[in-house]
Amino acid sequence: LIRGVRVEMALGRFLVTVTVMIASKSSMCHGLALVRQKARGMATSRGASRAISTRAMTTTTMSAFDPSQVKAISFDVTGTIMVHREPIMKTYADAAVWARLPNPPSEAELKPAFKAAYKESLLANPCFGGGGETRNTRKWWTTTVKRALELCETPRKYSDVEFERFFRRVYQHYGSLEGYMRLDDADAFLPWAEETGILMGITSNTPSRTMETVLPMNGLHNYFTWFTCSQDVGVEKPGKEIFDTAFEAAQFWSPGIQRHEILHIGDSLESDYCGARAAGFQALLLDRSDNPRVTQYQDWLDAPDYPGKSEADIEKGTVKDLLAVKALLEPHL
């Protein structure tokens, strides 16, 4: 159930039987897009534009979550344990006004332009330019933001001095406590989990700066033992390699731990739920649709297949918040 309402799918020939059926590409995408819409509270379905693999799916569902087996928890960051304090485009628009840019772009103008530029940059230069010794996070963001200004309905081109005054204001904001806030359920869950002695770590599609400065300045880093981020690994979720790296880190802290003994929690169907399941982890999908501060930007990712993948499995693996996770885990710890 998602928000107490059963999600019903129309997947063409994909019926509730014990046999393996192959759905058409369009019908599978449409069905999983409806799950995303419930899980995220999205306004429209993106199934047609975000192709999910058309390999066979089975309705014989493997359990997404066995609390008795959990020895470690892997967390996503943004949208899972913390969020941006205000809408991202409001921050950019306010910074443009503060920097006295001529004809500063509005929040409404920036929203589609930034999303397009962000996608363009991540596809051209993945992981915020990470995975190598020459990575430069600030340069990656500089290129992305300049491109966003160019993609506004009225394209903006500023001098180097004007742009740097504006961009530094934005970059400082996201390097300060003004940029982020901890989620209430995370504030309740993390101290409880720490008291139980369960191992916790981070597996996130974020820049290294999140690991090194954002988590510490928000008082969150001491809860975790490993910090795996896409910029360091050079691969983003749902790629198996980033989960492999997290698994190796968990093994250091808990020798002998197995993949199925790690529970990954996050708010992205593709990255967190399907990615973790495909890598052999357990997974729970957080439904953050009631929180307007939670925004999914990487909505072009494909959800990998895993044994037992179905709309019913995704439905069973969806929870409202981290307090629901606590209720599921508590009897077994």
Image (cartoon, helix red, strand yellow):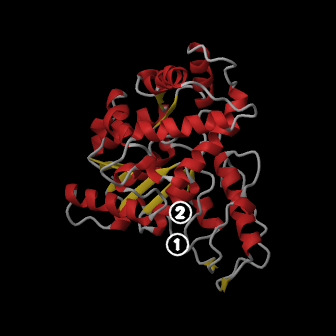
Provide residue 217's location: percent of width, then percent of height. 34, 27
At 56% from the left and 24% from the top, the residue drawn is: 159
The part of the image, by quadrant, that contains residue 221 is top left
Residue placed furthest toward the front: 159
Alpha carbon of mark 1 to alpha carbon of mark 2: how far? 7 Å
Which residue is at the front of the view, 208 or 134? 134
At 40% from the left and 27% from the top, the residue drawn is: 175
Which residue is at the front of the view, 231 or 222? 231
| Helix, strand or loop for disc 1 | loop
N-term-proximal mark, 1 vs 2:
2
Which residue is at the front of the view, 68 or 27? 27
Residue 148: mark: none
* Quarter that holds the N terminus: bottom right
The part of the image, by quadrant, that contains residue 270 is bottom right
In the rendered view, tell whether residue 200 sits above or below residue 82: below
Is 186 on the left-hand or right-hand side of 222?
right
Q: Are marks 1 and 2 in contact (CB under 8 Å)?
A: yes
Is 116 on the left-hand or right-hand side of 255?
right
Provide residue 181's location: percent of width, then percent of height. 47, 27
Is 74 on the left-hand or right-hand side of 57?
left
Provide residue 195's location: percent of width, then percent of height. 28, 40
In the rendered view, tell whether residue 149 sits above or below residue 6: above
Task: Report whether residue 120 is seen.
Answer: yes
Q: Which residue is mark 2?
A: 274
Which residue is at the front of the view, 85 or 300? 300
Query: Label 2: few (<14), some or many (≥20) within 10 Å?
Result: many
In the rendered view, tell whether residue 212 sits above or below residue 326: above
Task: Report whether residue 75 is seen.
Answer: no
At 71% from the left and 66% from the top, the residue drawn is: 29
Residue 306: mark: 1
